[in-house]
Image: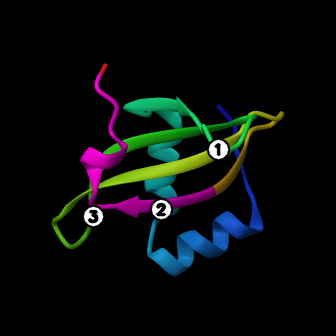
């Protein structure tokens, strides 16, 4: 699937040290895809990933549902249990 990166997403990814390849991996094969409850028309793609520091994080990518889908922002969090949804 083709995604577009917003300038804000590019800036945040650079600031947070999140490689494009990791964001692409989440977008192409997310462990979970959840509706963004605070913004209609947005989805959160998320996967647990190990970063260069060896720690496991949840990488969350916020995507609009327009065509083509646009990445609004991306961030990593160590608080996996806060955002993970049991299925």
Q: Is residue 60 above or below residue 29?
A: below
Decide if residue 6 is on the left or right side of residue 77. Answer: right
CA separation, marks 1 and 3? 28 Å
Q: Is residue 19 above or below residue 41?
A: below
Which stretch did the figure color magenta? Answer: 73-86
Residue underneath mark 1:
38
Q: Quadrant of residue 69?
A: top right
Q: Quadrant of residue 47?
A: top left
Mark 3 Cα-neighbour bin, 10 Å: few <14, some 14–19, many ≥20 = some
Which residue occupies the foreground of this view, 20 or 32? Answer: 32
Specify which label sits upstream in the sequence, 2 or 1: 1
Q: Which mark is residue 51?
A: 3
Q: Which mark is residue 75?
A: 2
Q: Residue at x 44, y 75 (%)?
A: 17
Q: Seen from this angle, which residue lies furthest right? A: 67
Task: Please give the count of numbered marks on the rendered protein.
Answer: 3
């Amino acid at each position: 699937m083709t995604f577009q990166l917003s300038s804000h997403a590019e800036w945040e990814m650079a600031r947070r040290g999140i490689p494009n390849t990791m964001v692409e991996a989440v977008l192409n094969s997310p462990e979970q895809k959840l509706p963004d409850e605070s913004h209609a028309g947005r989805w959160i793609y998320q996967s647990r990933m190990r970063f260069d520091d060896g720690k496991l994080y949840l990488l969350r990518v916020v995507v609009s549902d327009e065509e083509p889908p646009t990445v609004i922002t991306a961030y990593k969090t160590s608080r996996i249990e806060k955002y993970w949804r049991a299925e």
